[in-house]
Amino acid sequence: MRIKTVTFHGAHNYGAVLQAYALQQTLISLGYDNEIIDCRVDQESVFQSVKVSVARDNIAKIRNNLFRVLRYRAYKDRFDKFEKFINEDLSLTKRFHSFEELKRFPPEAEVYLAGSDQIWNTSRIVREMFFLRFGDSDIKRISYAASMGTYVIPPENQKLFGEFIRSFDKISVREKEASDYIESNYGIASLVHVDPVFLLKKAAWEEVSVECNINRKYILCYPLIFSSELNDYLRRLKHETGYHVVVVTTNPREKTQGDIYVRNAGPKQFLGLIRNAEIIVTTSFHGTAFSIVFEKQFIAFPVFNSTRITNILSLLGLKNRVFGNGDGISLEAIDYVEVNKKLDLERQRSLDFLKRAIEE
């Protein structure tokens, strides 16, 4: 059976490309023919954030631009690694250069699937592609672990959201809040399932990961947003453990304080950094998710959109790993035997849903 998937596969974001990879590998392992529809909503470039109108920029932006130029080699290396992963490790359809082109020439399939990540974040714009608004109406349409990200949605987008999801045959979302929102606002039932990265077991991710040359014990910090509390915690944790702090970053002037900054990691190197770390400190949902996959000791800083992180931690009995919920800075060892029992149940629930939704 042919399944075509839409998701954020082209973004140079670790969580986005790795969840796309995980969902595809899962579908293939279940015996389906799967390709990701290669219609990229946001074109990446090495200097995507550099401003060309320097005269209108303030001093901080000019300084950031200068740092980006000075670190061009690292950014280019990271860019190339992402493009290599997207083009070689993901199975893609032919390239569609616009949604209009996709609507004119939709790929043939028995099932269209809207994948995970924040594809249904409609706080600013409703992207029709992620609601599968293309192809013949008799093609089955399902979603898997779709995330809304936020529930502050303009009235006009709320109306479109309701209209679009009514065309789905089966709906799966990632957060309970999304399921509650859909049911209370539109009277449509949806199920909650884990992010695709949890569908692959630790051994499968270990095969994908690439070692990084850090020959010392280290705390890995993956911050998506700056937090002075995070810096304070890192300093205390470094003093307590004696470990170096390695920061994975794409910010031109990273405010998070570390001993080593990694700016050129691709998806596989990112996995390797998590795999070999002693402790993970992160503000990221997928940083948290992969800490669990690799059975690491970790602390999550849910600086924004915290429900994404707290939902999965509550589900797996790990809510005490959220910063502020524990005492002091000691990290009590996580009992991953118990965590994996719960994760195995959620993984099987998710696989059963996919098979039923596709086959019924």
Image (tube, grey):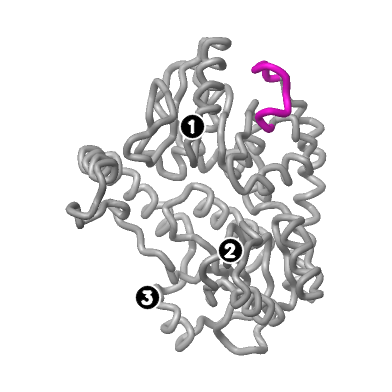
Query: Which is more N-terminal, label 1 or label 2?
Result: 2
Q: Position of residue 82 (x, y in %)?
A: 39, 50
Q: What residue is rendered at 69% in x and 72% in y? A: 142
Q: Position of residue 281 (x, y in %)?
A: 56, 29
What is the crowding at mark 1: few (fewer than 14 residues within 10 Å), some, or many (at least 20)? many
Looking at the image, residue 161 lies above or below residue 309: below
Residue beneath disc 3: 97
The front one of 53 and 37 is 53
Alpha carbons under labels 3 and 2: distance apart: 22 Å
Residue at the outermost left position: 55
Name the residue type under label 1.
Leu
Magenta residues?
322-331
Question: Which mark sits nearer the N-terminus, 3 or 2?
Answer: 3
Which residue is at 53% across, 32% downward? Answer: 274
- Report, in whole angstroms, how far the alpha carbon at label 2 lies from the one at label 1: 29 Å
Q: Are marks 1 and 3 in contact (CB under 8 Å)?
A: no
Q: Which residue is mark 1?
A: 273
Q: Is residue 16 magenta?
A: no
Q: Quadrant of the C terminus?
A: bottom right
Q: According to the image, label 2 marks what residue?
A: 121
Crowdedness of circle 3 by 10 Å Cα count: few (<14), some, many (20+)?
few
Q: Cα distance, mark 1 to mark 3?
A: 34 Å
- The structure residue drawn at horizontal position 42% and vertical position 18%, both measured from the top left corner, is 215
Was residue 328 drawn as part of the magenta stretch in this picture? yes
Mark 3: amino acid: His
Is the residue 356 above or below the residue 103 in the image?
above
Q: Nearer the viewer, mark 3 or mark 2?
A: 2
Q: Quadrant of the N terminus?
A: bottom right
